[in-house]
Image (spheres, rainbow, N blue to C red):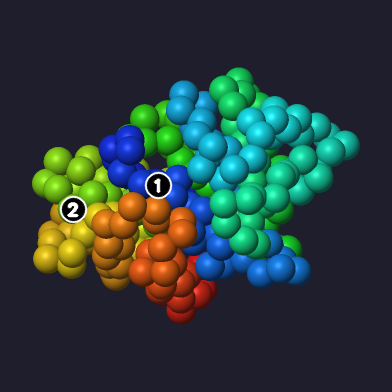
């Protein structure tokens, strides 16, 4: 299970979650991208699906995959919206997610607080997302430290809107970095799509 996390809101986590989900998914085994941000649940908007059904509709007799909606903004991705679900519902939903039959990507809340810790605690590895600015990287470093402490160490750093001139290694200590260029429609851009595939290849190489 993969967490897409970062220290700053608006740095591109949701777009990266969908892009990486598309790169990891196939027509027969689509990725499952899950919104775990109760305060700012915007995955459904980016994915082009309705806000419901979502994780609040998962029950003991209803599998998460039966509730998920097929994304229209990207291919080979199913989506579980959050839409301000109660805290306990998010915990239960994360605990019920499939772990072997398809890639699962958690779109995490920003920061290093309790809400961000919840999905990181369930994840195996983290994709750390940041803008190429000192403040964004400093905030992401706090999230990286929390991810490591919770057993989901960052496998890769992704700098969004980056020309490749910034090296995040001193702050983030990630083994690899992918620079995603600034484009007007990142889920429709071939340049951005190539970077999502690059991220997926790094994750595959690291058996994430």
* Relative to 131, 12 lies left or right: right
* Rendered position, 140 above or below 158: above
- In terms of image quadrants, where is residue 198? bottom left
- Residue in the foreground of this view, choosing between 180 and 202: 180
Query: Which residue sits furthest right?
Result: 61
Residue drawn at x 45%, y 45% as measured from the top left: 14
Question: Does residue 142 appear anywhere in the picture?
Answer: no
Q: Residues within 10 Å of mark 2 (few under 14, many from 20)?
A: many
Q: Are marks 2 and 1 in contact (CB under 8 Å)?
A: no
Q: Quadrant of the N terminus?
A: bottom right
- At horizontal 46% and vertical 24% (from top left) the residue drawn is 39
Q: Nearer the viewer, residue 112 or 7?
A: 7
Would you say 206 lies left or right of 159 here?
A: right
Q: Residues within 10 Å of mark 1 (few under 14, many from 20)?
A: many
| Residue, far bottom | 205
In this rendering, does residue 69 appear at all?
yes
Image vertical order of residue 140 relative to residue 25, above or below? above
Residue 132 is marked as 2
What secondary structure is found at the residue carrying circle 1?
A: helix
Residue that appears at 62% across and 66% down: 25
The image shows residue 118 at horizontal and vertical percentages of: 50, 36
The residue labelled by disc 1 is 13
């Amino acid at each position: 299970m993969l967490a897409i996390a970062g220290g700053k809101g608006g740095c591109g986590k949701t777009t990266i979650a969908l892009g990486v989900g598309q790169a990891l998914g196939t027509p027969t085994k689509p990725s499952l991208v899950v919104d775990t941000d109760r305060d700012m649940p915007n995955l459904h908007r980016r994915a082009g699906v309705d806000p419901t059904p979502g994780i609040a509709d998962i029950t003991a007799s209803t599998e998460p995959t039966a509730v998920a909606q097929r994304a229209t903004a990207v291919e080979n991705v199913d989506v579980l919206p959050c839409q301000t679900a109660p805290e306990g519902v998010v915990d239960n939903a994360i605990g019920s997610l499939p772990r072997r039959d398809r890639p699962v990507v958690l779109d995490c809340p920003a920061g290093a607080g309790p809400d961000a810790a919840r999905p990181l605690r369930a994840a195996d590895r983290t994709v750390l997302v940041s803008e190429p600015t000192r403040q964004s990287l400093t905030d992401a470093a706090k999230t990286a430290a929390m991810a490591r402490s919770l057993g989901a160490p960052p496998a890769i750093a992704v700098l969004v809107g980056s020309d490749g001139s910034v090296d995040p290694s001193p702050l983030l200590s990630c083994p690899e970095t992918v620079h995603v260029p600034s484009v007007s429609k990142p889920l429709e851009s071939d340049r951005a799509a190539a970077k999502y595939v690059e991220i997926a290849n790094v994750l595959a190489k690291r058996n994430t």
